[in-house]
Amino acid sequence: MAKGYWVAHVDVDDMDAYKNYIVANGAAFAEYGARFLVRGGERELREGTARARTVVIEFPSYEDALACYDSDVYQAAKALRDPVSTGDLVIMRGYDG
């Protein structure tokens, strides 16, 4: 079964308020088996444009990745994030060669 991934690019306007989202999303991520592969960090933009932060989260399956996003627990956390950040999020099925 192919894993699922969230790939997000985010600009944060208020990091102190954004930290509330980081705390709140932990319950949903734990419930759906999420694992951070990239969470900000050093990078070098070589082509195109990008937002300030890149985040890649791995889930045991594509279905888990979708279910996590749609869950009431994550949506409550997202409500904390939306007023203090702008971002792009893609949920992807991993390559299962």
Image (spheres, helix red, strand yellow):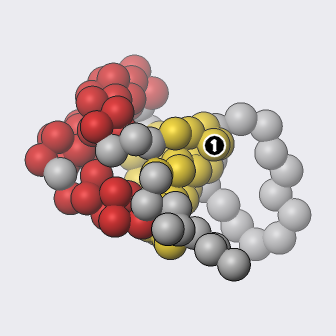
Which residue is tagged 1?
37
Q: Exactly how many numbered labels are in the figure?
A: 1
Element at label 1: strand
- The amino acid marked with disc number 1 is Leu
Q: Is 81 situated left or right of 53 in this image?
A: left
Q: Is 49 situated left or right of 22 in this image?
A: right
The residue lying furthest to the left in this view is: 72
Above or below residue 49? Residue 13 is above
Task: Determine if residue 63 is in view.
Answer: yes
The residue lying furthest to the bottom in this view is: 97
Task: Determine if residue 89 is in view.
Answer: no
Front residue of 56 and 42: 56
The residue lying furthest to the front in this view is: 1
Residue depicted at x 44% and y 42% = 34
Front residue of 54 and 62: 62
Residue depicted at x 34% and y 65% = 63
Front residue of 90 and 87: 90
Mark 1: few/some/many CA within 10 Å (<14, 14-19, 20+)? few
Quadrant in the picture for residue 51: bottom right
Image location (x, y in percent) of residue 94: 57, 69
- Give the quadrant of the C terminus: bottom right
Q: Is 65 situated left or right of 36 in this image?
A: left
Above or below residue 61? Residue 47 is below
Image location (x, y in percent) of residue 15: 45, 27
Image location (x, y in percent) of residue 58: 53, 50
Front residue of 14 and 62: 62
Residue depicted at x 20% and y 59% = 70
